[in-house]
Image (cartoon, rainbow, N blue to C red):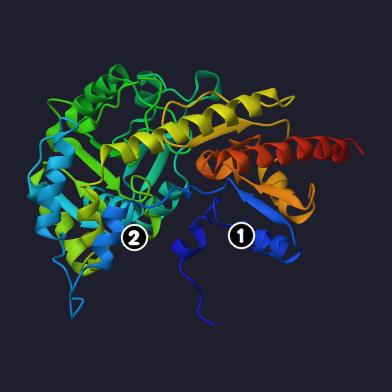
Amino acid sequence: MPAISHKAKAMPASPIRKLMPFAEAAKKRGTKIYHLNIGQPDIETPETFLNAVKNWDVKVIEYSPSAGNESYRKKLCGYYKEYDINLEASDIIITCGGSEAISIAMMTCFNPGDEIIIPEPFYANYNGFSCAANVVIKPIISTIDTGFALPPIEEFEKVITPKTKGIMICNPGNPTGYLYTKSELEALKILVKKYDLFLLSDEVYREFCYDGKEYVSVMQLEGIEDNVILLDSISKRYSACGARIGAMISKNKEIMKSALKFAQARLSPPSYAQVGAEAALDTPKSYFKNVKTEYIARRDYVIEALNKIPGVYCPKPSGAFYCIAKLPIDDSDKFCQWLLEEFSYNTQTVMLAPATGFYSTPGAGKNEVRIAYVLKIEDLKSAMTCLEEALKQYSLKASN
């Protein structure tokens, strides 16, 4: 049998999905699982989206333009203008989810062996996207003690080499929920300008910023317009994860012209989903107000519950719907698997994502987990009860 590629061997498994076989086995044993491992909201998709898809009267589902429907891209310009981001339709390429936006951006901006600096922990699939594009991640650790604030700029400069081509951030952050301040982004701007780097920013959670804190986009930073690439998705905004509609955005005409060639190679983004996404731009503000209120309640409950458990520490996130919690364990991969394989409390257990997969540095995150507070409060209460009991039993197991 021919050998598979080195790239296939190097491709990391998703920490969010790799435990699914154990979860399926647990379900077959009759165990109820509270899924806090994945950012799949239980919030209903807006009727604007669903009705547009239901009522789309066509006889043939044709390819859409490779850059996405022009009507959708034009309407998106109005959406971004509400955030003081001024765009033209030609600055936007609609992609098959935010994932494809990131992949195309990496393939457009970086040569094999080029380096990109990313504060960690970061969205686990950045590891996979960079592997597929033959890009080398140079991580700089942000710590739980600071709530995962941007590391000092000096730490960025320490890892810059002649191969450094870009910096990537997620704001608000997945998996930490950290929301970068304007001063932190301005500091990054100076660095990007100094070394003439690309700045990629994944901003899919902009609707979910809490406690009166301000969302600032990299597209609002003056003087580095040609360096900036914004990466977006409707998955979490409209609770439409399966629609697979994202966007790659830049005012750099050369970048967009080159990125379009990758978009043409995959033909087009989904037609039905674009119809829904375009209509969803008319979703009433009340929808987001209610969703935001719900997430704040969930966040407040989970963070308080976690910090009441002996040995657990979790900073309070200001955005998205994730948090990283430090647990009194020595190996989060083993613990998360044990929760599914061996643990059960009242025939229930909780599924978490080991934080190791959200780091690029070997050994980092061994006593941390990512929690997605995407379930209703009633379920979150049961999940936190399960986790507290699990930690008691795991501690006894370790001491025997």
Local crowd size for mark 1, using a 10 Å CA cut-off: few (<14), some (14–19), many (≥20): some
Left or right relative to 169: residue 357: right
Depth check: 226 or 69 in front? 69
Q: Residue at x 54, y 27 (%)?
A: 300
Can residue 63 be seen from the camera position used here? yes
Mark 1: which amino acid? Met
Figure check: 342 above or below 298:
below
Q: Residue at x 58, y 38 (%)?
A: 377
Q: Circle 1 sits on which residue?
A: 20
Asked where in the image residue 389 lies, by quadrant, the reply is: top right
Which part of the image, by quadrant, shows the N terminus? bottom right
Figure check: 64 above or below 282:
below
For marks 2 and 1, give the CA distance. 22 Å
Q: Secondary structure at mark 1?
A: helix
Depth check: 125 or 235 in front? 235
Left or right relative to 270: residue 222: left
Q: Circle 2 sits on which residue?
A: 243
Q: Residue at x 33, y 20 (%)?
A: 181
